[in-house]
Amino acid sequence: MKRRLDIYVPSEMVGIADQKPTHFLANVRAAFQGVGAEVSFMDATPEALQQSYRDDAYSLFYRNRPTHPHALEVRPAAFGPFWMIDKTADPAQKLVYGRAFEPDNVDSELATRFSQRITDRHKKAEVSQGGYVLVAMQGVIGRQRFWQSMNPLDMVRETIAHEPTRKVFLKLHPREDYSDVDLAALNAMIDGDRVQIVDGDLDSLLAGCDYTVSMNSSVSLKGLLYHKPGILFGDAEFHHVFQSVRIKGLSASFSDVMGADLPVERYLFWYLRQQHLWNFKPSIQKDILRRCRVMGWDV
């Protein structure tokens, strides 16, 4: 076993384990200290991440791609006290991506109770049918990345072309900076009527849409709280109940999206409760070590 664990986080989170003793990363620290490891929190500067490899240490990268064999990625789920540790940031290579979701093998009573708690906490608007498609935009919209079926601008073009009747509402990511060139290309597709850029409450938009479209945005996952189906244009570890352009193609995804079975309660239970690490589970520290062993660490 390595004698050290270095946890690389943004500068404002370096003291998180002391500030919030029930935080997931505080449980990570306690778990590794419990098996004799020295645990340090490090500022995740690009330089620090590049120089993180040590023969005697494991590295845990918060929301950053692992860069060497001793590193794993850690990130929170889109909602709830659930976390994932994996050896890759590539969605299609994550462990849960390749696992089969089998609704009949999920206890419906447990799933219903779990889903109700999640929706009570995170659902903020009443469901309606507004007759529009909500397209959640992420960053770098003019370039195709390896996990995408096309670039996001082409995703918008294809959505407009394959959805001839419903309105198409585009929601920009509030924390992304878009170049003038990309915004000009996006605005060229806007007609102010059927195709619009919208800036409003996300929950209200989700509650009113007929379905969602995104590359792999957590907006699509949150749409399940409103029982909204969706189409994914990129790889996503939560692809199992969505239409996937990468898997089944454009035309089939759009033709099937409104008619597909959507076992929301069972999927939320399976994906969040059974695939993630639940931070408030009494055995969380043992679960963290077990997950790291599954990822190849000798702990």
Image (cartoon, rainbow, N blue to C red):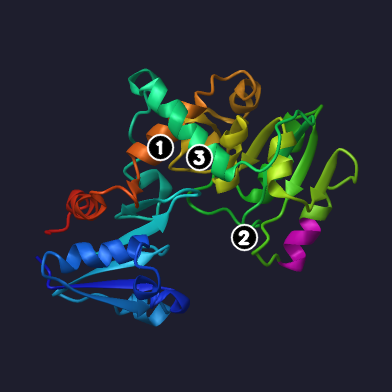
Would residue 172 appear left or right of 8 to someone viewing this image?
Answer: right
Where does residue 142 sit, x and y in percent of width and height?
Answer: 66, 57
- Picture disc at residue 3: none
Q: Amino acid at mark 1?
A: Tyr
Q: Secondary structure at mark 3?
A: helix
The residue pinned by badge 1 equals: 271
Q: What residue span does the magenta drawing correspond to? A: 179-185
The residue pinned by badge 2 equals: 140
Would residue 88 appear left or right of 227 to someone viewing this image?
Answer: left
The residue shown at (84%, 52%) is 188
Q: Nearer the viewer, residue 86 or 10?
A: 10
Where does residue 266 sit, x and y in percent of width and height?
Answer: 44, 27
Q: Amino acid at mark 2?
A: Val
- Mark found first going from the N terminus, 3 or 1: 3
The residue pinned by badge 3 equals: 118
Quarter residue 35 falls in: bottom left
Badge 1: how crowded within 10 Å, few (<14), some, or many (20+)?
some
